Image: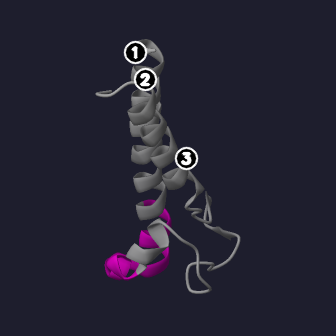
Amino acid sequence: MATVGKTLLIVGLILLGAAIVWWYTFFEQVLGDRVKEASDCFYYTSNICSLGSVVGDIPTYSPVAFWAAAAAELTCTFISWPC
């Protein structure tokens, strides 16, 4: 189980990193220097967060990547503590 736990930890960290990069890249294109105004959009989607289907070459940010990372980390914690 330790191998599965470590794998989930690594996958979760990669997903979290990807979610941060995707969120920042998308909202920086939309809001520029005011990117911090979209901080709530990191973990849920509201009408303000849904700014269109595509901005430039980057698809609209979806918090699914964040929640997938959180699920992987929580599963890691329950399978093998400490991860």
Q: Give the Cα separation between the discs numbered 3 and 2.
A: 15 Å
Magenta range: 25-37
Task: Determine whether label 1 and label 3 are within 8 Å by CB.
Answer: no
Crowding near the residue tagged with mark 3, few <14, some 14–19, many ≥20 C-alpha atoms within 10 Å: some
Left or right? Give the position of 34 relative to 72.
left
The amino acid type found where label 1 is placed reads Ala
Crowding near the residue tagged with mark 2, few <14, some 14–19, many ≥20 C-alpha atoms within 10 Å: many
Disc 1: which residue:
2
Q: Secondary structure at mark 3?
A: helix
Dominant SS type (magenta)? helix
Q: Give the Cα separation between the discs numbered 1 and 3.
A: 20 Å
Left or right? Give the position of 66 relative to 47.
left
Q: Where, by quadrant of the figure, is residue 80 drawn?
A: top left
Disc 2: which residue:
5
The amino acid type found where label 3 is placed reads Ala
Q: Is residue 48 above or below residue 42?
A: below
Residue 33 counted in the magenta span: yes
Task: Determine whether label 1 and label 2 are within 8 Å by CB.
Answer: yes
Tell me the mark number nearer the camera, choosing from 3 and 2.
2
Q: Secondary structure at mark 1?
A: helix
Quadrant occupied by the C terminus: top left
| Mark positioned earlier in the residue sequence (3 or 2) | 2
Disc 3: which residue:
68
The amino acid type found where label 2 is placed reads Gly
